[in-house]
Amino acid sequence: KLREAKEQDKMERLKRISRHIAASNVSEEGKRKARVNATGQSPVQAVIVDGARTPFVKSFGAIMKNNAISLGAAAVKGLVAKTKIDPNAIDQLIMGNVVVNSNAPNLAREIIIDLMLPSNIPGTTVSIACLSGLEAIYQGICQVEHGDASVVVAGGSDSLSSGQMSLPGNLTLALGKYSMGGGNKKGLYAGLSELFKIAGPVSGWLPKAPAIAERSTGRTMGYHADLMAEINAINRKDQDAFAIGSHSKASKARAAIRSEVVPVKNAEGKIVNDDNLIRSKINPAKVAKLKPAFRKPQDHGTVNAASSSALTDGASAVLIMSEAKAKELGYPTDVICKAYVKTAVEPYPQLLLAPAVAIPKCLEKAGLSLDDIDIFEIHEAFAAQVLATLKVLESKEFARAFLGRDTPVGSVPLEKVNLNGGSIAIGHPFAATGGRLVTTAANLLRKTGKRYALLSICAAGGIGGVMILERREN
């Protein structure tokens, strides 16, 4: 009987292996069909229930002593309170994080521990530059639709204020070798002599301030945004007008924005419950006099402080469920992720152009055209980057060079873009922006009764991600 049981177990394992091999040889279309039932939807449908975020506050300001774990915990705690979800129902917490704390790199798990959430929630942290939050949310959607979870909280958190400064490489190597590589066992004099020899002159030991620059190009994002403005003929006047418009829309949408924000207690015990970057009044004449921030005017510099997103601290969290679980618990099931695509381009020169490549791919994946989209939530790293993205979508040359097609993608009416303002006005705490876009887009779809929203984020490394949300009639 034992031999028969072992033989049966062996046959079952062989069957599983053969099915896996067969599945790997199936075409993409076949894989898609295998995941889809007769209604055209995934057998398990994930739904976007609700979202919450902390105030987005200028770095080195009111919440500068709250690190990314603290801010992430505030967003998750606020979401749990807002939605009244039982923490015991949460299967997964997935959080994006860009400015990583090397002492606690798995931010998601630290949030679970600090909030004393059920200890069986593993906690997963995602890092893919500014796309981290949106990627975390998509991973949560996949967890649900693959049947690995019924309830997921996903989002992102970043504190630029508490970012760690790196030591010079030679000093790091010297200290590491001394403390962990046996240098301290050579005797005090010999060990320290070796340390100083490797570390080099003391004058070179100062920590290096973090720079928002590309390792591959050596240039800042702002410099690349300037290049995009020059290449695509985006003038200074249009950039300034777009930036002012972002603040104007955000100012008018204050009530809607505040409904998405949950409070944070800072290190001094003060409750911070409002964004502090939105300006209700901006003097266009003063904006026009601002000097270019990244290149001189004679070098075609046009991007300035007003037309750039500011360094920001904050966090966001989104509640994702299976449709069945949401119905069971009485939550809305109307908003779903229709499609998600991430792609990349060569970082130099147009570092932030990848969303223009991802947009048509995502539309094709969703079976939609640009005209079908009712609401656009486009991350505003810089006004130049947004305007360049929109402009190339209308270009035949771009379509041929980047998309391998003769027809342009189409035009995006500005009146459909960032109805409640964008990152230039509200702020951009890197990994937290994805959750803000999803929450705002879902709320706008529900408020307006519209059907489709397209979300777009550019990221370091020449990466771009696009998600399409659909509001279904229940």
Image (cartoon, helix red, strand yellow):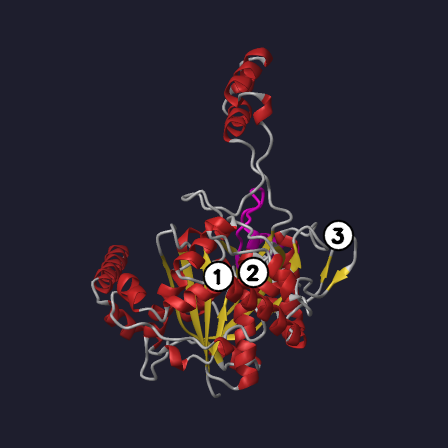
Residue designated by label 2: 307
Quadrant including the N terminus: bottom left
In the rendered structure, find residue 384 and report the number of the disc placed on it.
Answer: 1
- 170 versus 13 height, above or below: above
- 126 versus 378 height, above or below: above
Question: As rendered, which of 458 and 102 lies closer to the eye?
Answer: 458
Q: Between disc 2 and disc 1, whose residue precedes?
A: 2
Q: Position of residue 34 (x, y in %)?
A: 28, 73
370 displayed left or right of 5? right
Q: Most extreme residue toward the front, as rendered?
A: 298
Residue 383 visible somewhere in the drawing: yes
Residue designated by label 3: 267
State the SS at label 3. Answer: loop
Disc 3 and disc 2: Cα gap in Å? Answer: 31 Å
Disc 2 and disc 1: Cα gap in Å? Answer: 8 Å
Labelled pair 3, 2 in contact (Cβ < 8 Å): no
At 67% from the left edge and 64% from the top edge, which residue is drawn?
275
**Which three-letter amino acid code belongs to the residue tagged 3?**
Ala
**Which three-letter amino acid code belongs to the residue tagged 1?**
Ala
At 40% from the left edge and 81% from the top edge, which residue is drawn?
372
Q: Position of residue 102 (x, y in %)?
A: 56, 42
Which residues make up the magenta segment?
95-116
337 drawn magenta:
no
How many numbered discs sit on the rendered protein? Answer: 3
108 drawn magenta:
yes
Q: Between disc 3 and disc 1, whose residue precedes?
A: 3
Labelled pair 2, 1 in contact (Cβ < 8 Å): yes
